[in-house]
Each structure stands twice: as structure tokens, then as C-alpha cells.
Amino acid sequence: MEKKTKTLLIILTASVCVLTILAVILSIMAINTANRRPTLEQICIQSHDIEFQDDITFAGERVPLEMFNIRERYERELLSNCYFHSNTMLLLKRSKRWFPVIEPILEKYQIPDDFKYLCVVESTLTNAVSPAGAVGFWQFMESTGKDFGLEINKDVDMRYNVELETEAACKYFQKAYKTFNNWTLVAASFNAGTRRVQKFMKEQKVKSYYDLLMADETERYVFRVLAIKTIFENPEQHGIYISKDLEYKPFKYKTVAITETVDDWAEFAQEHGITYKLLKIFNPWLRSNRLKVKKGETYEIKIPTKPFNITSSYSREALGEHDFAEFENDTVIR
């Protein structure tokens, strides 16, 4: 019995020693791990309030920032976009390609230049498709697109044609302005619909967008536009720096008039020295593999030119199989 007790004591003592040693080892490892972690100063990203002027306008119409809720709603969108750096940088890059396309059309229809920021908010300057089925830079539904003269069928969808959809948007703005005689309400109606904005104004007995209570999306809409405008007009002041060499340059292309049915766009692309993919990038409104052209109809097809017509085959021929390509201002160089 005494022998068993001694054995148990030895085992217990050994176990305690092992556990003590393990505890010491784990403590040392924990201390080393803690020492390798960055300090609070290292992991904290400094964020600052953004000072802004009180004379903010949209399409020449003053924004009443002396109203506390207007100021806070504007500040919310400004902070969101200033500190969403990756997205805002991409939007700025895209704007260098697409604003030169959109601005002359707005001017042609006598629509204020500030309306170009609506399609930034609508689609991030891409041919986006919403869950509801709205399409293109300006996010037209099919029925609305047809109402404003856009051709939409199985072969073509002109909502994907930036120039034509911008013209349709301008026609909408002109019509809405005749209703509201106010550009800010026109912008809000592009999001919510003319009838809905009219209904809200009648029910709430107010005449200004800034006094209306509407769905959150529409309440934020104009302020998102204002925030994008503020940042784009002076990006460096808001911490966004874009290298001129890395801006997205406007597309370069020539046009080919199509007056007869095209049975195979891939074959057509080959005949013009480009790929099917490039053809669709420059003409996203082509929605099928062929195009039926009725008598008297004409379609203009964009054919990319240098440097936008470069393909992998071209690169291999120009540079050689084992050379490395570098890119400068959208041009491939050795």
C-alpha cells in the first residue's frame, strides 16, 4: 500500500512538472506573438473630417446646406466616396474615357453639364444590368428605352450604345424639365419617376426636392451625385491622385456602315482585322451572332484602331514569342 502511494506521488509530481513546463513554453510563445503584432499606432488608419464649402450647386441651383439634414446627407455621401478609394479611383479613370463622349451630347440638347454625374451614380460608367432589368450607362428599362426612341430586339439593344442612350436620357430630362421647371427635381425624377415625384409633392405640399420625404434611395440619389461632382472637380483635395499616364484614354475607332444583313459577326470581325471580342467591346449593343438589316436601314459599326485593335496574335508577331511587352499611354512598346 505504501509503495502504491509513493508511485502515485511520483506520477503526480511529474505531471505537475510537465504542466508547469508547458505553461512556461506557452507563455513565452504568447509573449513573442504579442511582440510581433503591430502596435495600435501601426494599424490605425488616420481618418479626417472633410471640410467643404457652403456654396454647393447642382446644375446652377443652390443646395441649402444651412439645413442640418441636408448638410448631413451631403456629408454622408462625401465621406462614403472619399474613403472608398478603389471605387472612386476607378470612376475617375473611366470618366476620362466617357465624359468626352457624354458632354457634347448634353450640350447639344442644352442639358446642364452636371447631369453627366448621374450616369456615374447610375452605372459606374459601365453597361450595367440591374436586377430589375435596367440596362446601360443610364439604366433604362426596356419600355422606357423604346418610349424615347431606342431600338431593342433580339439582335440589337441600343441601351448598350452610350451615345444613343445618352440622347434618350437628354430627351427624358427635357420632358421632365417642362414638368418641374427645376433641374434638381428632374434628377430626382430620373431615379424615382416623374409621376411618383409629382405625387409626393402634391401629398406633402412642398415644391423643393430638399423638403420632400421619399424612399431612401431617392433621398440619397442627388446627394450621391453632388458628392461625385465635388470629388471629381478637385480629386487631389479629397485625397484621390490619378496618374495622367494611367487614365483610361478615349476609344479610337473608325466606323463601317452596314446596309445588308450580317450572318456571322465573328467572320465580319476577322475580315476587319480584329477579334469577335473586340467587336463586341466596341459595339456592345450587338446582342446576337448576326444582324438582320431591313431595306433602307443602316447601322454604324465601330472598328477599333491602334492601339485599341491590338490582339494577342498581333503582340506575338510584333514583339516575338519570348519578348516582354510594356504599355505606355495605351500603346504597346518593346
Image (cartoon, rainbow, N blue to C red):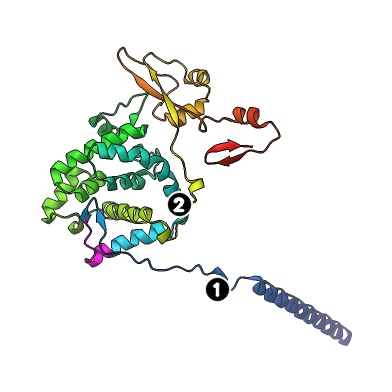
Say whether residue 66 is magenta: yes
Is 168 left, or right, of 8 in this rendering?
A: left
Q: Residue 189 location, x and y as percent?
A: 22, 46
Residue 257 appears in which quarter of the rendering? Answer: top left
Residue 89 tag number: 2
At label 2, counting other C-alpha atoms closer than 10 Å, the crowd grade (few under 14, some 14-19, many 20 or more) is: some
Tell me the residue at 33%/24% (across/down): 153
Q: Is residue 130 visible?
A: no
Viewer can see residue 261: yes
Distance between mark 2 and mark 1 Cα atoms: 27 Å
* Quadrant the C terminus occupies: top right
Q: Are the residues flagged by discs 2 and 1 in contact, CB closer than 8 Å?
A: no
Q: Decide: is 215 above or below 299.
A: below
Query: Which residue is the site of mark 1?
Result: 41
**As drawn, is 269 to the left or to the right of 119?**
right
- Residue type at mark 2 is Met
Which stretch appears magenta? 62-71
